Amino acid sequence: MRSDIIEADLTWIDHRFETGVRVTVTGDKITAITRDGVPTRRLRGRALLPGFVNAHSHAFQRGLRGLGEHYPEGFGDFWSWREAMYTLVEELTPDRLRRLCLLAFEEMLAAGVTTVGEFHYIRHLDAEQRDFAFDEIVLQAAAEAGIRIALLPCLYTTGGFDRPLAGGQLRFATPELDAALRQMDRLETQLNAVTQTIGIAPHSLRAVPSDMAKACFVAAADRDWVVHMHVEEQQREIDDCVAALGVRPMRWLLDNIDLNHRFTAIHATHTTDDDLAALSQRSGNVCVCPITEGNLGDGIANMRKMLERPDSVCVGSDSNIRIDFAEEARQMEYSQRLRDQRRGRLIDANGHTAPLLLDCVTENGARALNIPTGQIETGHYADFATIDLEHPHLAETNPDALAAAFVFGAGAECVREVCVGGVWR
C-alpha cells in the first residue's frame, strides 16, 4: 500500500500552526506525524488543516437559495419559510434531487468540508407507496462528489403534536418504525465502508410520537448508531410540546431517554441553562447552525453555556443557504458579542477564540457523527483542507495569528485543496 508524506508550510497540530510537520498517509489513514522523512507532497504556500465536519445538512434545501426572502405581510419567520420549503418538496424529481445534492456536496468540498452528516428527510418519490426511492440518490450524489457522508435517515410521522401529515410532508412519512428500520438495515449493507456510515434521526418530538422516539433510541443502541434530533429551535415548538406532553422537548428527552455521547440535539436555540448542563453531564452534543439560524430568525443560542464542556458543540450548514465554515464559526462568536455587548465570548483556557471555534467545525463534529476524522492525528482518516497563504485575504498575516485571521477575516475563498481518505481533489 502506497504511503504519502505531506508537508505544508504550516500544519494545525495541538490547536496551533507549526512548521516542519510531516504527515504520513497510508491508504486512507494517517499513520505517522513526524519531522522526519522526505516529503512526497510538498504543499508550498499552504497551511494544512483537518477537513471541516458539517454535522447537520439538508442537501435538497440548496434548491431554496434566494427563495423565501419576499415578505408581503411585512415580516416572516421559520413557519412562513417552511411553506416555501414544502413547495420545493412537492416539486422534487429524482434527477432534481440528485443535482441539488451534488451541488451542495461539491460546494461543501470547495469550502473545505470533507465530512457531512446528512439529515435526510425527503424519502419518497411515491408518497402513497412509501418507496424510499430518494435514499440511495443522496448516497450516490455523495459518492459522485467524493465527500464522506454519515447518512441520517429521518423518522417523520406527524405534522405536529397530534396532527396528521399533509401536503409535502407526505413525502417524509415513516409511520411504521419496523419498515423504516428494515430500509435502514438494507441501506447499511450497501454503504461504502470507507466513506459512508449511517445513523438515525427522529425528526423532532412534534414529528415523532413519544413512543416511537423511545423506540428509535433503543434501535440505535442495538445497532451502535448515532441519534440526531431537532430540539427547541422555535419557541412555538416548545409551547406545543408543553401543551401536549407537559414539559419542554429537551426536558422530556432527559426524563425519558438514556442520553449519551451518541446523541446530538440540533439547534437547542431556546434550551434552558439547566437542561443544557444536564445534557452536557450525560455527554450529549449540540449542533448549532449559525447562518441558517440567523437567516430564519430563530434566536440566539446560549453558546457560552454549551461550551462549558468544550467538546460538546459542533456546527452544521442546515439549509445550505450559504456554505462557509469560517463564517459559521465567526457567527458563533459574533452572535454572543451582539447579545452581550462584549468581545471574546467563546474562548479557550488561554483566552483564544479561534482554536475553540475550529474545534467546533472539525473534531467536535466528528465526535457527534462517531467518525475518526476532524483531527490530524495518527489513526484518523486522511481528511484535510489546505488554506492558501498567498490569498489576498490572508496576505501579511503572522503565522501565530493565522487561525484568527482565517476565522474572522477570510473564509471558503481561501481553501485551495481538500483530501478525503487520502484522495486529493
Image: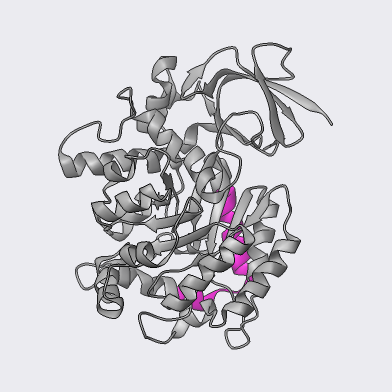
Please report the residue visible at 43 percent of the width from the left and 45 percent of the height from the top. 314
Relative to 352, 6 lies left or right: right
Residue 272: quarter of image: bottom left
Residue 220: horizontal and vertical position, in percent? 57, 63
Report the colour scheme.
one colour
Please report the residue visible at 70 percent of the width from the left and 53 percent of the height from the top. 144
Number of marks: 0
Residue 398: quarter of image: top left
Magenta region includes residue 105: yes
Please report the residue visible at 26 percent of the width from the left and 74 percent of the height from the top. 242
Is residue 145 positioned above or below 152 on the image?
Answer: above
Q: Main secondary structure of the magenta part?
A: helix
Is residue 100 positioned above or below 346 on the image?
Answer: below
Front residue of 219/299: it is: 219
Q: Is residue 397 visible?
A: no
Relative to 137, 173 lies left or right: left
Please report the residue visible at 82 percent of the width from the left and 29 percent of the height from the top. 2
Relative to 245, 265 lies left or right: right
Residue 27: horizontal and vertical position, in percent? 77, 34
Relative to 78, 396 lies left or right: right
Residue 25: quarter of image: top right
Residue 129: horizontal and vertical position, in percent? 63, 87
Residue range of the region highlighted in magenta in the rendering: 87-107
Residue 268: horizontal and vertical position, in percent? 33, 57
For the C terminus, the image quarter is top right
For the N terminus, the image quarter is top right
Is residue 44 positioned above or below 327 on the image?
Answer: above
Q: Is residue 227 visible?
A: yes
Is residue 146 positioned above or below 346 on the image?
Answer: below
Front residue of 269/408: it is: 269
Q: For the view shown, which residue lies furthest in the left direction?
A: 341
Magenta region includes residue 100: yes
